Image (cartoon, rainbow, N blue to C red):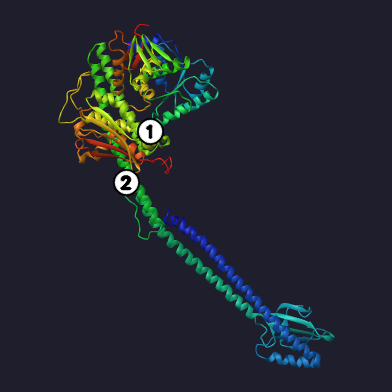
Amino acid sequence: MTAFGKLIRTTAFRLTLVYLFLFALFAASLLGYFAWNTRRLITEQITSNVNEEFSELDATYARRGLRGLVYDIENRALRPGANLYLVTTPTGQALAGNVAALGNGVMGTTGWSETIYHRLDEPQNKRPHRALVRVSELTNGFRLLIGRDLEERRRIFGIVAKAAQWSLLIVIVLGLGGGIFVARRVLRRIDAMTGTTRRIMEGDLSERLPVGRSGDELDRLADNLNAMLARIETLMNGLKEVSDNIAHDLKTPLTRLRNRAEEALAASGSGADYRQALERTIEESDGLIRTFNALLMIARAESGQVRGDMADFDAAEVANGIQELYEPLAEDNGMVLRVKAVPAPLHGNRELISQALANLVENAIKYGKPATAPRPPAPPGVAAAAEPPEILIEARREGDSVLLSVTDHGPGIPEADRQHAIERFVRLEASRTQPGSGLGLSLASAVATLHRGELQLADAAPGLRVTLAIPAHSGEGQGERV
Amino acid sequence: MLTETQQSATESESQMRLLIIEDDRESADYLVKAFREVGHVADLASDGEEGLSLADSGGYDVLVVDRMLPKRDGLSVIGALRDKGDHTPVLILSALGQVDDRIKGLRAGGDDYLPKPYSFAELLARVEVLSRRHGGPAEDTVYKVGDLELDRLSHRVVRGKEELTLQPREFRLLEYLMKHAGQVVTRTMLLENVWDYHFDPQTNVIDVHVSRLRAKIDKGFDRPLLHTIRGAGYMIRDGIR
């Protein structure tokens, strides 16, 4: 598209054209009204002037007869700027007056008419003027014509017409010029935006649209687009990080899987060896599926897709249920799992909150043993040494929040590492040797976010306290969907 | 693909007629073959319309329906069947394995929901439980397996002449296992039905509960009743039937 083509296609330019048309129409009708009214006024003036003179002359005729009338007319015709006068005999012969020639048949009809004429004192070859005349019949068949030149009316009309032409021309020139000016200004800014957008589309997400200082609609649009770009950039970075992590943490077990299968195939083993290799393959793929499910769950919790299943329930029940489920497992690991829960009504996704709490408890069982006193796993049935390490699940309400926390007395997480620990797939160095997908805390965090709450990690001195803090009315008043 | 124990266990079950509605040829063939291997009859429909007309012709014990099907969505097939008053048990298979999808599936009239990818052992166990539930409701007040008796009303559990003391959760666990005596019950099924949780624990939490229960009901008796089925789950049955 040519630059001009682009220009005349802009909204600003098209709007200008519309305004131009409307304005011209307005100017034309205004001038037209003015011209028409002026003409009417002049005509009225002439009519009343002629009528007045007619009644005077009619009176003269009645009083002093034809002679008096002729005398009076000759006098009047000599005055400067005189009207037109003509008196004719019943046969049509001119008796007196200052008219040399008239349009055909003007004297034949009485009343008002417009005609061309020549004055007696003018040269015959001059362009004839127009006049408005009144013809009346006197007694005895004599006729009297009184009229007035219309040159003045024509001249005024001409002035108005010329004014109309000029003003139209000026309106069009100014309008087009202004339109082009505004359109080019807008076009330049839009072009700048388009250029930036194109660079962004080509992959440079850090670019931002230029924002002027006027705060007009384009600036506001640019501001909003920039905010959107910032959000997209954050999301893209998050996505990239996640896919890097997925690549890393899924590829490792996949490689293990593949190596085992290859190894089993290469070794000329017995049926039992094959069986064992296959069983380990299935085990490994189950682990992969679990990791995958956890990732999906986190993604969905983070995007708010599971908000539909919100219901009212008691956080204390969830705490008791999870304690009941994990208590034997904790005991097998040489720990005690206790619960301290007071009724704390909550509106949320029970299943997800249970799962988040279960993850926290599983973490506590895995990592919550005091580092200083490594305890050999107690054989089942044999009483463990006095005071096994304790894990405590708590549920309570504090202000507007419902707190579900799990406290262990393990080595804890150094403050500097805490934020990091919530991120996906992060398994702090100390825990690399333990099995697990490294998604437990991130899932709990995503569940907290879904409920507009947060996951807090704190020092339990010694140990770690992880708290799921959720507003008691997370689902209400804010709509079921995000 | 199946352990000897499981195979022999299922052979003694009455034969089931299954309809599998699944559009992915490979997994469908795998399922048909696997079900036939354990002695069931399985028909195959590869889209929703065909599935609906086959299911209409009747005579199936359980339908295994994939959620996303060509021509007619799995849930709409189930809806159409239920509207006609057909209450054949349906197990929904779906790649959409999240909590809300499960609920949607069950609301649409499905009886059970298994997210993909699944293990055949899990599917088989669930299908068998569904078919049993449909056939004759095991709603007796007293369940008996060998010399083990569980009274659902008085909450008494007796093995031989000895009364056993179970925690409430252990009781419910045993109740569920005995309700499906002779059938494989997977860990997920236990977590869903006894604890009402639908997530995947990352630890062997169910095994710990089962081994505690086993310590109470089998320890000190010469014939174990609660068996571990490798690669699948657990089963309670009298050793020789």
Q: How many marks?
A: 2
Residue located beneath label 2 in the image = A205
- The residue at the far top in this view is B240
- The residue at the far right in this view is A140
Mark before the other along the chain sequence, 1 or 2: 2
Q: From what the image shows, is residue A84 above or below residue B59?
A: below
Mark 2 secondary-structure assignment: loop
Mark 1 secondary-structure assignment: helix
Residue located beneath label 1 in the image = A350
The crowding category of the residue bearing disc 1, from other C-alpha atoms within 10 Å (few below 14, some 14 to 19, many at least 20), is: some
Q: Is residue B134 left or right of residue A455?
A: right
Q: Chain of mark 1?
A: A
Q: From what the image shows, is residue A277 above or below residue A442?
A: above
Rounded to the nearest angstrom, the CA distance separating label 1 from label 2 is: 39 Å
Q: Nearer the viewer, residue A396 or A380?
A: A396
Q: From what the image shows, is residue A222 above or below residue B233?
A: below
Kind of residue at disc 2: Leu
Kind of residue at disc 1: Arg
Horizontal and vertical percent position of residue A202: 33, 45
Horizontal and vertical percent position of residue A167: 53, 70
Query: Which residue is found at the position 74% from the left and 92% from the top?
Result: A72
